[in-house]
Amino acid sequence: MTPRRILLLATAALLPHMAQAQQRGIRTASRTPLLIPGKTTLFQRVILRPGATLHAQPNAPQGRPVAGFSVAHVYARRDGWIEIGREADGTVDGWVREDRAIDWRHTMVGAFTNPAGRERTMFLRDVATLRGLLAAPDMTQQALALRAAAGQPGSPVLALEPETFIDIQRNFYLLPILEAETIQRRDGTQMRALEVISAPAELRQAPQQADPSRLRDFRGGIVFVIDSTVSMQPYIDRTREAIRRIIARIGDTAVRDNFRFGMVAYRADISARPQLEYVTRLVAAPDLSQPPASILPALESVRAATVSTEQFDEDAIAGLRMAIDQVDWAQFGGRYVVLITDAGALDATDPKSQTRLGIPEIKALAEARGVALFAIHLQTPEGRSNHAHARAQYTELTRYGAAGSLYFPVEGGSPQAFERVVNGLTNALFRQVADTVGRPVGGVEPARTPEAERMAQQVEIVATAMRLAYLGREGGTTAPDVVRSFTTDRDLRDPTVAALDVRVLLTRNQLSDLSQALTRILDAGLAGRTDPRSFFGQLRAAFAATARDPARLGNLARVGQALGEYLDGLPYQSQVMELTEQEWLAMGAAAQRELINGIEAKLRLYQEFAARPDLWVTLDGRPGGEAFFPVPLEALP
């Protein structure tokens, strides 16, 4: 029996008919939407159910259909009816029955993670079933039984997530979260129980199957980001040889049109040592308009520096950013960046860092582009004191869903050991692309050691994720209906793996407001370094000078009061939001400095988000400041 699968709402279906209603709307400049009870800046909003009709007055006999899943502001409530308007500018469109609308207090949405390596998410009929499942000692076995019974009469499972991955930053959809609570299992694992609005297909409708023929046009790009400082020449040479071998195997085979290499070289700050020549250099971008071998002359030009850098850590994040930003990843289904280095990365607080971004920030930018990051870390004897620091950085940098951390250390750092690792990784990535397009190429050596097998397994999960993302972009889905259901954000087979990312839809204006608020907090923190007791006083003065209601901030008790009400009540732990004056003073200088540094890194991440127009979604002609970006909870302050 075939279970129903969930189909997601695409951008084109979000607000298609509300614009027509708006043309007939009545604008009253003095009117504003109703505020959410207890809030001073947040307006009430609703999501309209399918079948909702728009009326000139409550109980008026004639009504116009309004598209399901339309989002509207609430201007009035009367006798079971609500007056709505698409914008908050005083334009009202009419009245709808209250039972045809669902209150949406927070603009929280769910975003599916790539389903490669985990079970498809289930959407359950009631919260009691979900709570019982999450608390059960045999949760995994119960989940298997529920999934097997999906689609049968009386099953608690309303729907399953799609088989293919839909990237919310490429094909925007709404999976609104109405409520969220954190449930802690006996083993200490925390899982969020979410009440969502989902859009399932009818039971009689067969699920849409991914069309394998679409994979014939799947293309893979690998960009090596290589440390080219003074010690790296043997590794540069072997990386170049690994690329040359794959290109030779491609030859004139059919897969030659589906695979390309690129390279970025990086060093460190050149202000004190101009002999280093560059911080980053785009050696070659993967270019499908040229034959695979066209990259080889450019690779020959890469040479290690002739002078040492000022410190052991190099500017790896600057190299990664160049690979993420300056490659046209849209032409590739498989998007792989491989970092090769014998040192750690300059962090966001280092004045010599070109980007002033940290590991979490560059990882977020890679995820926004759908790029998987790998790291080959040469643990040479010279860098012994740096190994633990670099390992921690690159383990976190390369975490990729169910594949785990794509971090591959080379103990001892010998060129021969490195050659085995870089060949193994390059072969595994190339083999996955060739197999994906159905054009396998002979002569690619299979994995023969436990380490190589582990690498191949991880690459297979990543490659599966890339295929599912590609098919999701190519296929698309529709949304015929709306139901409320209950789900969790974790994989029920392995709760350490995320199944849904909880995000907050922020407009450009809101992100700008948030950035300004964080700037004031940062300035107050820097001003208070000589006397930490002045921090909250500086904060109150800074916000009172610009706030619409300065009296509201006169008794500022925690930092979160100044950050915008759209962050209140969200289901995440925030070091900044809940910080009180007592806690600030008790933290000590080192912890205070770490918190201020974290705020500074968040600000730079928001600047990166704002500068990338491809990340923003503009719904139905809204002005640019009202474009949306689904900000991950982890990126909030």
Image: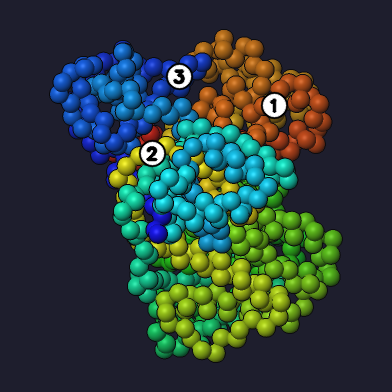
Residue depicted at 37% across the width and 75% down the height: 216
Residue 164, position as x, y percentages in the image: 43, 59
Q: Earlier in the sequence, mark 3 or mark 1?
A: 3
- Residue 537 position by quadrant: top right
Q: CA distance from mark 2 to mark 1?
A: 38 Å
Q: Quadrant of the N terminus?
A: bottom left
- Three-letter amino acid code at the position of disc 1: Leu
Q: CA distance from mark 3 to mark 2?
A: 24 Å
Along the viewing direction, whichever of 421 and 141 lies nearer the viewer:
141
User: Which mark, residue 579?
Assistant: 1
Callout 2 touching callout 1 (CB < 8 Å): no
Residue 23 visible in the displayed image = no
Residue depicted at 15% across the width and 24% down the height: 62
Image vertical order of residue 383 relative to residue 70, above or below: below
| Residue furthest to the top | 551
Q: Quadrant of the C terminus?
A: top right
- Three-letter amino acid code at the position of disc 3: Ile
Label 3: few (<14), some or many (≥20) within 10 Å? some
Label 2: few (<14), some or many (≥20) within 10 Å? few
- Three-letter amino acid code at the position of disc 2: Val
Q: Earlier in the sequence, mark 3 or mark 2?
A: 3
Q: Which residue is mark 3?
A: 36
Residue depicted at 56% across the width and 66% down the height: 461
Q: Which residue is mark 2?
A: 483
